[in-house]
Amino acid sequence: MAGSSGDTLTFHPDFCYEDGSIILLVNSPTETAFKVHKGLLSQYSSVFKDMTSLSLTNDSGLLVYGSESELPVVRLRQDDAVGLSSVLKAIYDNRFFDRLLPKVLTDQGEGAYLSMLSAMMPVARKYDFSSVLDGCADALCRVAPTYLPKLTERLGALRALPASSSAARSTNILTALHLADASSLYDLLPSLFYQISAFLSPEEIYDLPNTSLSWKDKTRCILGVTELRSEQDEELHVLHVQFPVGDCTKHALTDEGVWMRPHKWTQLSSKLRRTKRVMVFEKVEFEKDAPLGVVQCRDCTLRYEEEYVKNQWRVWGALPKVFRLAKSWEGLAQGRVE
């Protein structure tokens, strides 16, 4: 397969099959033709299946003109070459999403990744390429996890990015939010609202352009931050309620050289309470708190870790309600968005 041009058409270099049976023509950014297989389009798109079942004549309004080989030429108005080529790559290569989309994203890679999804999802939705849309939704889940351990993993990766990447990080999260909202992928919204709340202060959220985040969504995030901080305090309260376990006699040595019982040690709790960051779902290494001066026996550590994780799951279950999206995850999945 190689790119070529006829008297009037310039073909996309990746889509000029010699045995192609239909030509798709787009005008943006420049007029570009795609010589592809009508049967494959019909297999993946109900719209093209119905379209190609019609008699493609000038009277149908679909045929622009006949090519040299008398193939039907269908003009796809308002579509662009980047989006169409990405959709075609997905139907010609069933490993497209696994092979071409990164599993571990850098800030630069994630931006390119989301730009491609932004171009291809409207085309896939418009022409009902359902399997491509499903692939796009699965790909978007890598940015907006719908499972708590995956979100915890993503938060850790985002925290590890350099400070210089903070603007790109916020842009990527907001882009993913727009894509999920436009495609009615409501179950992705809680994760994305949480990411906004975790990396932007209420003041920064308020100052975002309305084109980036609507007033309604700003309100969701700011109210969510308040509630999540309250949940965070409750989560950290376990420090005082659960320690020590049973007859634990393990003592902790403070930075001042004073030995005391673990339940008397409040530096970790007070430090986390003072933070303005929302960090309810962040992973805490309970056995690696030596820099904070905490020494705990293993029974106490395991008990605290168990309670901490249990509380994280409780907050996760309430997340749609925290952001005023729906009363439950089940309601969100059914499209009952408030």
Image: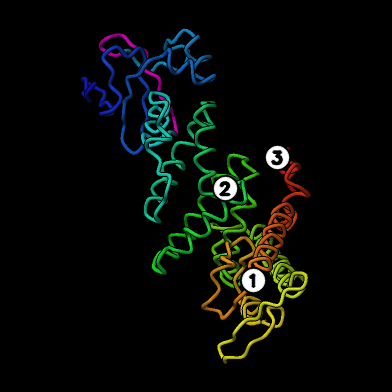
Q: Position of residue 16 (x, y in %)?
A: 28, 21
Q: Quadrant of residue 262?
A: bottom right
Alpha-carbon span between mark 2 and mark 3: 14 Å
The x, y position of residue 212, in whole percent, is: 54, 57
Secondary structure, mark 1, is loop
> Which amino acid is tagged 2?
Pro
> Earlier along the polypeptide chain: callout 2 or callout 1?
2
Q: Quick one: label 1 or label 3, which is nearer the N terminus? A: 1
User: Residue, x 73% and y 66% (percent of image)?
Assistant: 231
Q: Quadrant of residue 198?
A: bottom right
In the drawing, what numbered circle is on residue 145?
2
Locate residue 257 relative to residue 1 in the image: left or right.
right
Question: Which stretch did the figure color magenta?
Answer: 67-78
Instruction: Please give the residue where the numbered disc 1 appears in the rendered image.
Output: 297
Label 2 secondary element: loop
Q: Which residue has dot 3 on it?
A: 333
Count neighbours of disc 2 (C-alpha within 10 A) and say few if under 14, some if 14 to 19, many if 20 or more. many
Q: Amino acid at mark 1?
A: Cys
- Percent from the top left, x then y, of residue 178? 55, 49
Q: Nearer the viewer, residue 17 or 70?
A: 17
Name the foreground residue: 331 vs 155.
155
| Numbered label attached to residue 204 | none
